[in-house]
Amino acid sequence: MTALSLLCFALGYISGSLPFAVWITRRAKGIDVRDGGSGHMTATNTIRQAGWVAGIAVFLLDTAKGFVPTYLAIQLGLPDWSIGLAAVGAVIGHCWPVFAQFRGGKGLAVTGGALLAVSPPAFLITAGVLIFFVLVTRHAARGSLVASLIFPVALWLVGLRGAVLWVAAPAGLVLAARYLVDWNRSYGELWLDREKKSNGR
């Protein structure tokens, strides 16, 4: 493992640790996004706490947190495994951010940004896999957990290799670990997982 590869991992972690959801929600509403809703530093929870504009801004910035260090590793001509190291560093940083008491988000947008840097088709394929499993399970955490484990398999089946798999496989494992925490959570406040009321409406 070269010093440059370690540096890219560290830069990825620092990039991922930037708590945009915390900063934007605090600026918009004067609250910590993690104190309500799902309790996580995510774009979805930002929407709950501060509205759609803030949530979309967080989503774009979180995507950039994965894209930038991964793209930098690619431009430096690093081997595929080093590109994956930079990407997973960003995902880990987002999930356990040093700048936010290690209480972060789930890492989906960051993973998406990293895959977008490596291969736009890979980004689209994994997005489709995610949507499919969330719709099938009708549970955001369970669907996302299963999808994250399927990501590298789906990409391999369509013939994508190299850096794409080095990003998708380790990032998928981190995502699965994060979503396992919410396996039994009820998402009554989300449109997709809205629980049926006792009166059947």
Image (cartoon, rainbow, N blue to C red):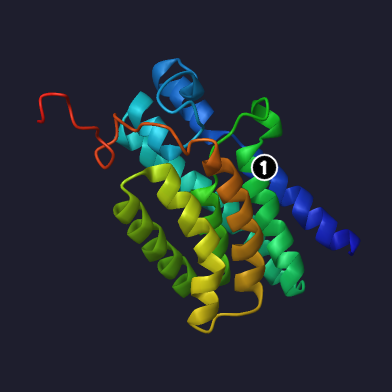
Quadrant into which the N terminus falls:
bottom right
Q: Position of residue 128 (x, y in %)?
A: 37, 64
Q: Position of residue 7 (x, y in %)?
A: 82, 54
Q: Horizontal placement of 76 versus 44: left or right?
A: right
Q: Is residue 138 above or below residue 28?
A: below
For image coordinates 49% across by 72% down, the residue present is 154
- The image shows a total of numbered marks equal to 1
Depth check: 13 or 192 in front?
192
Q: Is residue 197 above or below residue 71?
A: above
Depth check: 186 or 81 in front?
186
Q: Is residue 48 above or below residue 166?
A: above
**Residue linked to disc 1:** 93
Q: Position of residue 145 (x, y in %)?
A: 49, 50
Q: Position of residue 37 (x, y in %)?
A: 40, 24
Q: Residue furthest toward the bottom?
A: 159
Q: Residue furthest toward the top?
A: 30
Quadrant into which the C terminus falls:
top left
For image coordinates 34% across by 60% down, the residue present is 132
Residue 23 in view of the camera: yes
For image coordinates 54% across by 37% down, the residue present is 105
Q: Horizontal placement of 58 versus 173: left or right?
A: left
For image coordinates 53% across by 84% down, the residue present is 159
| Number of other residues with Cα within 10 Å of mark 1, as a class: few under 14, some 14 to 19, many 20 or more | many
Residue 167: quarter of image? bottom right
Residue type highlighted by circle 1: Gly
Q: Is residue 25 above or below residue 60?
A: above
Depth check: 32 or 140 in front?
140
Helix, strand or loop for disc 1: helix
Q: Horizontal placement of 201 versus 33: left or right?
A: left
Residue 82: quarter of image? bottom right
Residue 116 in view of the camera: no
